[in-house]
Image (tube, helix red, strand yellow):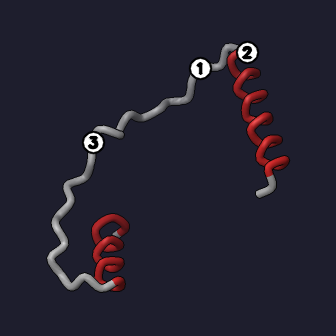
Amino acid sequence: MKPAKVTRIVLACAVLHNMRRMWGEPNPDVQDDLDEQPDVQNFDGPMDGRGVRNRLIEQYFV
């Protein structure tokens, strides 16, 4: 993205944030699940790219 476009997006977000605060809208619910990490099993299979990728897909996305 071009820097000018990124600047316009950030400016629009700031304006919307300030309008929300000015109108007294409540903060959106933010979940603090950052401290909770899933249990990860050590990978003991072959260390080739496809094997590692498939293991990650099975563990996190299936």
Amino acid bearing label 2: Trp
Q: Are marks 2 and 1 in contact (CB under 8 Å)?
A: no
Q: Nearer the viewer, residue 13 or 1?
A: 1
Relative horizontal placement of residue 42, taking residue 8 as reference (left or right): left
Quarter of the view holding residue 16: top right
Q: Which mark is residue 26?
A: 1
Q: Secondary structure at mark 1?
A: loop
Q: Residue at x 77, y 47 (%)?
A: 6
Marked residue nearer the N-terminal end (1 or 3) = 1
Q: How many marks?
A: 3
Q: Report helix, strand or loop for mark 2.
A: loop
**Which residue bears the numbered disc 3?**
36
Per the image, the residue denoted by label 2 is 23
Residue drawn at (74%, 38%), measured in percent from left and top?
Answer: 10
Local crowd size for mark 1, using a 10 Å CA cut-off: few (<14), some (14–19), many (≥20): few
Residue 24 coordinates in the image, percent (x, y)? 67, 14
| Above or below 30: residue 59 | below
Quarter of image, res 55: bottom left
Q: Quadrant of the N terminus?
A: bottom right
Residue drawn where x is 29% and y is 84% of the image: 51
Give, as a three-letter code, the residue at label 3: Glu
Whole-angstrom CA distance, mark 3 to mark 2, is: 34 Å
Where residue 11 appears, x then y in whole percent? 79, 34
| Residue type at numbered disc 1 | Pro
